[in-house]
Image: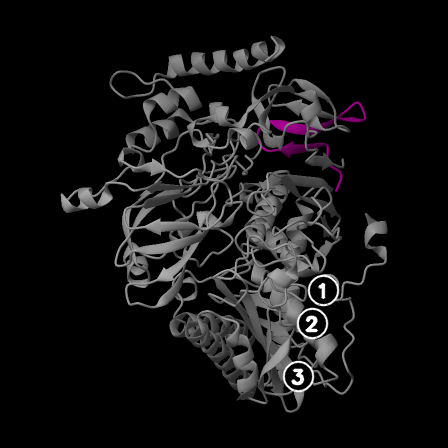
Amino acid sequence: MERRQIFIGDNLRLERKDGEARFICSCDRDLGSGQVNFKELCAVKESPTPDIGPGYASSDQDMAGRMCFREFFCPGCGIRLATEVARVGDPYLWDIQLKM
Amino acid sequence: MEEQTANIVWDGMARGYIPPEELRIDPKLRLHTREAEDVDPITYEVVRNTLQNINLEHGQTIQKLSISPITMIVRDFQCSILTENGDVMCLGPYLLYLGNMLGLITKWILENRSGEPGIKDGDVFLCNDPYVGTSHQQDTGLTSPVFWQGELFCWVSNSVHYSDVGGPMPGSFCLASNSIWEDPPCFPPIKLLERGKLRPDVEQLFLRQSRLPNTVAMDLHAAIAGLSVARERIIKLIERYGPDTVKGVMNRIIDAGERVIEEKLRLIPDGRWSERVYTEAAVPGDRGIYTSQINIVKEGGYLYVDNEGTSPQVGAINNTYAGLAGGTLAALTIMLAYDLAGVSGGLYRRVKFRPVPGTITCADFPAPLSTAGQFNMPMVVATATGAVAKMVACADAPLREKAFGMADVHAYGGSIFNGINQHGQFFVGMNAGMAVGALPASPVRDGVDTGGLFWVPGMEAANVEENELAWPVLTLYRRQNTAGAAGAGRFRSGLGAEEAWVLHGAEQMSMEVYMNESFVKNQGLLGGNPGGRSFFQVKKNTDVRLCLAEGKLPQDLAKLAGGDVPMYFKGPPIALETNDVWSSNLPNFAGYGDPLERDPVLVARDVAESKLTTADARQVYAVIFKDDGSVDDENTRACRAGRKQRRLSEIKGGC
């Protein structure tokens, strides 16, 4: 089935524009090419996992310090499009690759 | 990846068993393959429902006759009816990842036992070998052929968690194993019953390994009884409707399920979705961090699953192909086959695995596997859930609404302990109180508070009183968590729970398996917060007895006198004594979407129900309340807009 638009959750979509797939935010900001990991197109904040909130505090600071919490925001409106808990230094997980 | 798998023999010995498309079955075994193609709709429905009810009765028989709390109350088992060639037709509402394993064991038997010693009417095969097809040695499978007039008509199978099947650790979870020879023994399929007669030599061989032979014997006989009931009912069904009609219905049930899955797959765009989950501590004292990754490629009418990106097998945190396939199919069953009432065979036809061997989620011999039930299997389910949820969230409506977030990464904060109980007898306890669980968030609604574990739909947490009857413990409290940052999102996770215990009727016991996560392992879904950190705490030499003597029931571990024990994710056994108190917490699971997008009405509802403080409502959701307790819409909008702006300005500023 030919698709011109694929919604990824509530605030992100892949859309064909001028013959090219583009990631578009719900604020209509064009994030960039649909051929790359959309996380690379976001504003990214990386912080220690205990900083997420009280439910994340750890008694093992050394182990917890080797992990981080990443937030991926639309650079246009600041809405949070994705999060990931990752080992510090690991690449962003390319978790959504769509064919259009 | 294909190069890695090209020359590997997936034989269930050197590596996990993957059945070929065409099974190599000895021709002297006659299979019943004839089927009626013109079954009328009424007969079809009667036979279909009867088959499903037979399977349910199979499960209820196990539950009623077993005596271990883990089986009798928690329902950590599975039962299934399979076609003559081992294809799973239907599952019970129990541990979902075991369903596929029963198919693997049965197919392995068809390929490796149909010649010698042969497969005969009344046989029951026992298998607890994870390389053949179980999750870990404790989840021992029984599978039995159902014959009709000399032909193998179908199979009935079950897998039950047995409390202790040997090995160096009570309960058989061998945390420090570095090879299968430090684990409980593995039995490839062997006849426990031959032509309907129990083989006492084989039964004794199995029970002889256990520290709890009487308990395991009762549970084993419950499992045999379940098979007997199912077999008898199927024979009666055949007598009434004829073998070709019953077989025709069985095949049509699977075909119909496959068509439903095909329709759902048409709603999903082609693509590739991945999830990555981190775990730690291959053995106690290890400071390593390891990855589990599952990737799902959807191409036309099929799904292709691999685990590329997963860490090489190490220490005691491994599972075999059976676990990878079973855990992935469990997540797919819940999000794609939710309307098939346990008829999962059609789904299984549409999923192809391309596993990377030698990894912690597809380990080769001689990796140890006994801890998989507690650590790896929930992790595989969680990893698969993340990948499947993102795939389903990209689907057209209404399927996209069926996506939901990740649940527990390591089995529901469970703990395993042993000692001498209040009756002077050795016991092994598995605390599944945390099986109260929580359902994660979805794109259209909050998760369900203490709503169970989706990968074991029929699971129930033991009542506090049942735990106190079974083991020498007193529960100080069991309560629901609050809805803070953990699992926050546009839709929040259901709330998990916490409980605390003290010894009662015994002076000591040993806590062998516990989980105090060093870092959060859950992942949020599409902008949601991850679930919280699962923790386990022990406080030694407290004043709990004094409190109880004064008629006070302590409700907060932090307020008790005494000393905290430094805890690791996995540590050595902890000796618990009379004045010690311990607590375990099952955190809230994954949230969905940006918390700043949550409807303030839902935030206010949580505050009104004392599930969320106004401080957390402001901190996590940027919702401001007026003095009268109502939502201040104007200030909430302004606060949220400012928060989003600040996110970007802080990043631009170098945060």
From where the camera sits, is residue B169 visible?
A: yes
Mark 3: give few (<14), some (14-19) or many (20+) Cα within 10 Å. many
Q: Residue type at mark 2: give it.
A: Lys
Badge 1 or badge 2: first in the primary sequence? 1
Q: Residue type at mark 1: give it.
A: Tyr
Are marks 3 and 1 in one subunit? Answer: yes
Q: Residue type at mark 3: give it.
A: Leu
Q: Which residue is mark 1?
A: B17
Q: Which residue is mark 2?
A: B107
| Mark number, residue B629 | none
The percent coordinates of residue B92 (x first, y second) are 50, 65
Mark 1: give few (<14), some (14-19) or many (20+) Cα within 10 Å. many
User: Any magenta on residue B404?
Assistant: no
Q: Residue furthest left?
A: B550
Chain letter of mark 2 equals: B
Q: At numbered mark 3, what does the secondary structure look like: helix, strand or loop? A: strand
Residues at circles 2 and 3 in contact by the CB criterion of under 8 Å? no
User: For the residues marked 2 and 3, what is the alpha-carbon distance in whole angstroms?
Assistant: 13 Å
Front one among B435 and B241: B435
User: On screen, B576 above or below B130?
Assistant: above
Are marks 1 and 2 in one subunit? Answer: yes
Q: Which residues are magenta?
A: A1-21
The percent coordinates of residue B322 (x first, y second) are 65, 60
Residue A90 picture quarter:
top right
From where the camera sits, is residue B449 visible?
A: no
The percent coordinates of residue B72 (x first, y second) are 40, 66
Q: At numbered mark 2, what does the secondary structure look like: helix, strand or loop? A: helix
In the rendered image, the quadrant that contains the C terminus of chain B is top right
Q: Which residue is mark 3?
A: B152
Chain letter of mark 3 equals: B
